[in-house]
């Protein structure tokens, strides 16, 4: 998605060779007009997949997932980071290591919302080492549901997570894919997103 690359160049900030700040349009302050463009592109990419649910992890993926869900007219569920008092009954849960925060957390989804008959599209803002998406894949597998694939706004290809997931036959669609970045700029690349 050329528009995502242009938005990153115009409004993103490279903090280090591993960290890209896009908080002013994607994951703290949200450019809602651009969010609608993202939803349109995700819906176009997965329009023939008969998806019944979209799933993400709180919190940065929720806006993208909700926008795509509205466009595709399907429900959105999100894995909570750690079980809380408002998640009762049986759950699926998996431990995920956060690259951004440098810690582990439990991703939890109620069994009421993720069923074996579901065909699930995973959505997130970033794909780096792949830990978050891998955790979501495991939750889909635990439920006996079918995985349609994943859509991510920005993939940091140099961190390898996307390549590992694709090698397992998982369809990953990245709206922007970064080969490298530093204080001198960002190098984008393309990937074979399909399986």
Image: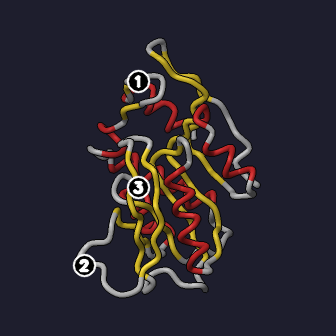
Looking at the image, is mark 2 or mark 3 nearer the viewer? Answer: 2
Report the quarter where the C terminus lies.
bottom right
Q: Residues within 10 Å of mark 2 (few under 14, many from 20)?
A: few
Residue drawn at (41%, 24%) of the image: 14
Q: Is residue 115 left or right of 81 when viewed as pictured?
A: right
Disc 1 and disc 3: Cα gap in Å? 20 Å
Residue 12 against residue 89 in the figure, above or below: above
Residue 137 against residue 92 in the figure, above or below: above
Report the quarter where the N terminus lies.
top right
Disc 2 and disc 3: Cα gap in Å? 20 Å
- Which of the numbered marks, if any, corresponds to residue 74? none
Disc 2 and disc 1: Cα gap in Å? 37 Å
Q: Mark 2–mark 1 contact, CB under 8 Å?
A: no
Residue drawn at (42%, 74%) of the image: 109
The residue beneath circle 1 is: 14
Mark 3: secondary structure:
loop
Q: x and y percent of residue 49 in the render?
A: 67, 70
Of residue 8 and residue 145, the one placed in the foreground of this image is 145
Q: Is residue 89 left or right of 55 when viewed as pictured?
A: left
- Total marks shown come to 3
- Which of the numbered marks, if any, corresponds to residue 86? 2
Residue drawn at (45%, 71%) of the image: 93
Q: Earlier in the sequence, mark 1 or mark 3?
A: 1
Q: x and y percent of residue 57 in the render?
A: 41, 60
The residue beneath circle 3 is: 61
Residue drawn at (54%, 62%) of the image: 122
Mark 1: secondary structure:
strand
Q: Earlier in the sequence, mark 2 or mark 1?
A: 1
């Amino acid at each position: 998605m050329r528009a995502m690359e242009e938005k990153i160049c115009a409004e993103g900030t490279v903090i280090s060779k591993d960290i890209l700040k896009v908080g002013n349009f994607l994951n703290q302050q949200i450019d809602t007009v651009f969010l609608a463009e993202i939803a349109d592109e995700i819906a176009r990419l997965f329009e023939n997949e008969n998806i019944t649910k979209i799933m993400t992890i709180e919190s940065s993926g929720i806006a993208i997932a909700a926008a795509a869900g509205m466009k595709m007219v399907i429900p959105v569920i999100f894995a909570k980071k750690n079980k809380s008092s408002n998640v009762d009954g049986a759950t699926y849960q998996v431990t995920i290591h956060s690259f951004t925060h440098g810690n582990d957390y439990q991703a939890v989804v109620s069994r009421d919302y993720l069923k074996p008959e579901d065909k699930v599209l995973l959505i997130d803002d970033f794909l780096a080492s792949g830990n978050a998406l891998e955790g979501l894949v495991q939750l889909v597998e635990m439920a006996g549901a079918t995985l349609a694939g994943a859509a991510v706004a920005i993939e940091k290809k140099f961190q390898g997570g996307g390549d590992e997931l694709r090698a397992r036959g998982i369809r990953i669609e990245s709206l922007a894919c970064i080969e490298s970045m530093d204080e001198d700029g960002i190098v984008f690349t393309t990937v074979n997103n399909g399986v």
